[in-house]
């Protein structure tokens, strides 16, 4: 988002979900993570509307690594979406939320035996197989528990998405999935077909994250339809589901220009129809796994301004009471964000500062060049669009407690994750003597 769509009240305070942010921070303290649930629902609805128009059979599965908390799984369930989990911890959280376990997919490139046992015991809807070792492990688990399960095969399609190197996953040398080019994918399929306890329902690929254009998805659909045709001809098997993963980009700054969910879905649909026709294949069901696009624009990190360092004729550092512990993305990916002074929304811009965090790292700069009104200690900074991979990648670096999380919706407020305390920080520690 840019700063334009934001709402302020007469006092010039940023209002989120009908709630004054200065009230929120008086009530819950800072740093504080706020989600506007209306935005989450709206983002979901955009994807849904696009698919409804497409006429395809489809499933939207929220990639919960973007933000996993009990309350979030509850909202996702209320909206009738599926979700995917990538660890025993995410699965546990979803179970605690009462999320319908049949609507979960389990991902990961190194699922442990214990995680597979947990998934099978709880009847997770689909296990997305990533590698040969995992096929063996899962077979062991299914035999031991005398049961069967639905699986998909994660393929490495050999597509390099135009995004940060750390968030590319579909390129040929990726650590994820069965490589298509070398024939690994076909061998994996043959192996799975020979295991009666595994029911192969589809193929999956994820090309990367924060992708702005449709080309990667178009290439992906082409690759997956080509392999479907090849498998039909060689083995008489046609995957019923194509899971295209996530990666739909969002705007963090005014220069970001991602396509809308409707554009992505439209391109996927037209390519799919063309290829189904060309290969004489039935139209598959399409699954997507958006994470960032659902929660990113809904999240805000609120901080209190503290110290300031002015270097005459050079620059100024304005420090806030959070930073890389609650949002590692600027330090890790050079990610850019927009921010506002939430208690002075009506004041003119006065200067450009480095918005610095409080962590003991020179790299702990949340925003490199931020235009702000005249500020003083005690002011409130709102960093925008922090809802994806912010709290979910948070740490206790420097033994700072992680922030609280509040959901706001149409004037209502609910604390959904409480702030960590110092006692929480030492709860796992044991004295040496
Ligand atoms: N499906 C699979 C198999 C994935 O690996 C991912 C993300 C998604 C779906 C969701 O992607 P999204 O729609 O959120 O882009 N920590 C990085 C992003 C890592 C994404 C990992 N996989 C960041 O902060 O940018």
Image: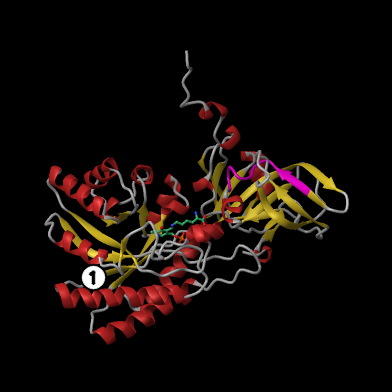
Q: Position of residue 31 (x, y in %)?
A: 63, 42
- The answer to whether residue 11 is seen in the rendering is no
Q: Which residue is mark 1?
A: 240
Q: Is residue 49 above or below residue 87?
A: below
Question: Which residue is at a point 52% across and 73% down the rendered structure image?
Answer: 259
Residue 221 position in % (x across, y down)? 35, 75
Q: Residue at x 43, y 62 (%)?
A: 290
Who's the residue at 73% across and 57% down the image?
370
* Picture quadrant where residue 56 is located: bottom left
Magenta span: predominant SS is loop
Between 11 and 164, which is closer to the camera in this rendering?
164
Q: Quadrant of the N terminus?
A: bottom right
* Quadrant of the image where one finds ligand 1: bottom left
Q: Is residue 225 left or right of residue 72?
A: left
Q: Position of residue 134 (x, y in %)?
A: 25, 51
The magenta segment: 317-327
- Whether 365 is among the magenta residues is no
Q: Is residue 227 left or right of residue 296?
A: left
| Quarter of the rendering containing residue 127 | bottom left
Q: Nearer the viewer, residue 104 or 335?
A: 335
Residue 284 horizontal/vertical position (percent): 27, 74
Instruction: Looking at this view, name the residue that lies furthest to the right.
Output: 312
Identify whether 422 is placed above or below 70: above
Determine if the magenta segment contains residue 326.
yes
Secondary structure beneath dot 1 equals loop
Q: Residues within 10 Å of mark 1 (few under 14, many from 20)?
A: some
């Amino acid at each position: 988002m840019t700063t334009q769509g934001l709402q302020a009240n007469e006092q010039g305070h940023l209002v989120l979900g009908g709630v004054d942010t200065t009230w929120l921070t008086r009530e819950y303290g800072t740093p504080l993570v706020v989600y506007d649930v209306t935005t989450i629902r709206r983002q979901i609805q955009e994807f849904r509307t696009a698919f409804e128009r497409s006429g395809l059979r489809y499933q939207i599965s929220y990639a919960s690594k973007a933000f996993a908390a009990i309350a979030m799984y509850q909202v996702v369930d209320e909206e009738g979406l599926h979700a995917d989990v990538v660890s025993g911890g995410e699965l546990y959280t979803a179970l605690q939320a009462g999320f319908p376990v049949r609507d979960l997919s389990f991902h990961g490139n190194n699922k442990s035996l214990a995680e597979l046992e947990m998934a099978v015991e709880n009847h997770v809807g689909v296990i997305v197989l990533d590698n040969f070792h995992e096929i063996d492990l899962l077979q062991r688990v299914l035999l031991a528990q005398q049961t069967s399960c639905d699986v998909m095969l994660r393929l490495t399609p050999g597509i390099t998405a135009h995004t940060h190197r750390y968030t590319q996953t579909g390129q040929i040398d990726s650590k994820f999935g069965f490589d298509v080019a070398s024939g690994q994918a076909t061998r994996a399929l043959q192996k799975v077909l020979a295991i009666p306890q595994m029911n192969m329902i589809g193929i999956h690929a994820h090309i990367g994250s924060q992708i702005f254009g449709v080309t990667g998805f178009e290439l992906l659909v082409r690759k997956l339809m080509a392999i479907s045709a090849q498998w039909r001809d060689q083995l008489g098997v046609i995957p019923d589901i194509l899971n295209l993963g996530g990666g739909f980009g969002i705007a963090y700054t005014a220069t970001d220009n991602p396509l809308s969910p409707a554009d992505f879905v439209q391109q996927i649909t037209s390519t799919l129809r063309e290829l189904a026709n060309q290969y004489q294949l039935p139209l598959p069901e399409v699954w997507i796994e958006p994470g960032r696009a659902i929660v990113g624009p809904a999240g805000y990190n609120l901080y209190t301004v503290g110290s300031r360092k002015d270097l005459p004729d050079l620059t100024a550092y304005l420090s806030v009471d959070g930073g890389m512990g609650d949002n590692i993305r600027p330090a890790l990916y050079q990610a850019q964000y927009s921010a506002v002074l939430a208690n002075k929304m009506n004041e003119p811009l006065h200067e450009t500062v480095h918005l610095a965090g409080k962590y003991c790292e020179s790299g702990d700069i949340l925003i490199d060049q931020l235009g702000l009104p005249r500020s003083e200690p005690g002011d409130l900074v709102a960093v925008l669009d922090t809802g994806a991979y912010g709290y979910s990648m948070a740490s206790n670096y420097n033994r700072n407690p992680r922030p609280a999380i509040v959901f706001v919706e149409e004037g209502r407020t609910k604390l959904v994750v409480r702030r960590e305390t110092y006692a929480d920080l030492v709860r796992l520690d044991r004295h040496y003597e």
